[in-house]
Image: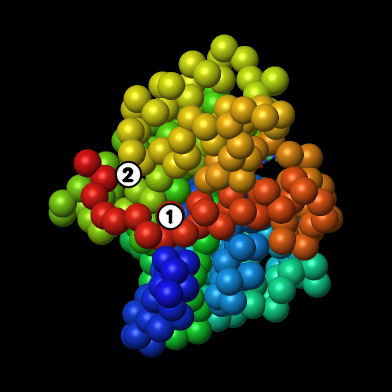
Amino acid sequence: MVTTKEKIIAALKNREPSDQPESLADASEKGGVGKTSVTSGLIAVAAEMGLEVVGGDLDPRATLTKELGVTDPEFSINDVMYVDPEEPPTDPAELVHDALVPAGPGWPSNVRVLASERALGRRELDPTPGMELRLRRALQGLKGDVDLVILDAPPRPGGKLMGAILIAANRVLIPATLTEDGYDGAVELMRSISHIAAPGGLNPNLVVAGVVFSIVPKRGEMRDVHFHHEKAIREEFGDLVMGDPEDVYWSGEGGVLRPDGPVIRNYAIREECRTACIPITAAPGREAKRLVSSYEQVLLRSLAAKGGVA
Ligand SMILES: Nc1ncnc2c1ncn2[C@@H]1O[C@H](COP(=O)(O)OP(=O)(O)OP(=O)(O)O)[C@@H](O)[C@H]1O
Ligand SMILES: [Mg+2]
């Protein structure tokens, strides 16, 4: 029997060479909600599924770039997006090949990186007409060579980099902590998405892949504030929310047992992976295994999600 997982992997691998690679952005308009960690986890499990994966870092602080083991990139997404008015026109679909570099030694060889650097921050104030469209064009240049691009967004209320992401991506996954920031970041991002994805907007086919709870505390550490925001997010986003209440309220001692559902728990091993610049799939221990299972479910649900943002 062919499982959904196998079907999704086959669909990505057997895309027509003329098709743009599938691209999934992790975004929220608030900071510290787990965007980069989710991006890194999804890249790790996609690589383990045998996909040719690219991690694209649109955050000028380059957190994902560093975690993927790339330091001081010679050529970055900034060089792909930048237009020098004194020079002849450049095609982002060609430049992107100069920017694409292998991930560091801790990562599998089927992971490559479109790195970020501090100078990317200057693009937020860049008046070049049409600059926000260059990322989409760049990803088109990867067709035939790449199965899946996963983009990490900076925490911004709109702006050009967020615009570039929402125009370039096929799908957006929204990580949300069980806090005011998790809720606000998701609600505000949906407002931006609704303009871009409206009929006649710049990316009318953009799919909201879902809202994933991230950095979820253990039951014993859940406070009223967490329960309150879980409820608020479920009320606001309905079926877009991944994971049932049983996935969130796991106690670890009897009770409902789904510690590895499509909900990203707060586990120290996640931070350890960032520091060591290794994928969660290479980390030891039970917590790492649970996170791998959760990231895998989140990735498959995100890729299976069907259109419509209304
Ligand atoms: N599942 C997790 N378990 C434990 N710690 C986590 C987990 N996810 C994220 N963290 C930690 O929480 C902090 C914020 O996470 P992360 O950097 O992924 O968020 P972000 O939304 O990308 O932040 P920013 O808006 O600054 O880019 C980091 O220190 C990260 O290591
Ligand atoms: Mg981040």
Q: Amino acid at mark 1?
A: Ser
| Quarter where residue 250 is shown | top right
Q: Secondary structure at mark 1?
A: helix
Pointer 1: what residue? 302
Q: Position of residue 303 (x, y in %)?
A: 41, 60
Separation of residues labelled 1 and 2 (CA atoms) = 16 Å
- Vertical arrangement, residue 265 with respect to residue 45, above or below: above
Residue shown at 53% from the left, 45% from the top: 262
Q: Quadrant of the N terminus?
A: bottom left
Badge 2 local density, few (<14 within 10 Å), some, or many (20+)? many
Q: Position of residue 206 (x, y in %)?
A: 30, 55
- Per the rendering, the mark at residue 288 is none
Q: Is mark 1 within 8 Å of ligand 1?
A: no
| Quarter where residue 280 is shown | bottom right
Q: Amino acid at mark 2?
A: Ile
Q: Is residue 274 visible?
A: no
Pointer 2: what residue? 193
Q: Secondary structure at mark 2?
A: helix
How many numbered marks are there?
2
Residue shown at 40% from the left, 45% from the top: 210
In the displayed orientation, state which residue is furthest to the left. Answer: 200
Compare residues 310 and 97 and report the one nearer the observer. Answer: 310
- Vertical arrangement, residue 296 with respect to residue 230, above or below: below
292 to the left or right of 183: right
- Vertical arrangement, residue 77 with respect to residue 108, above or below: above
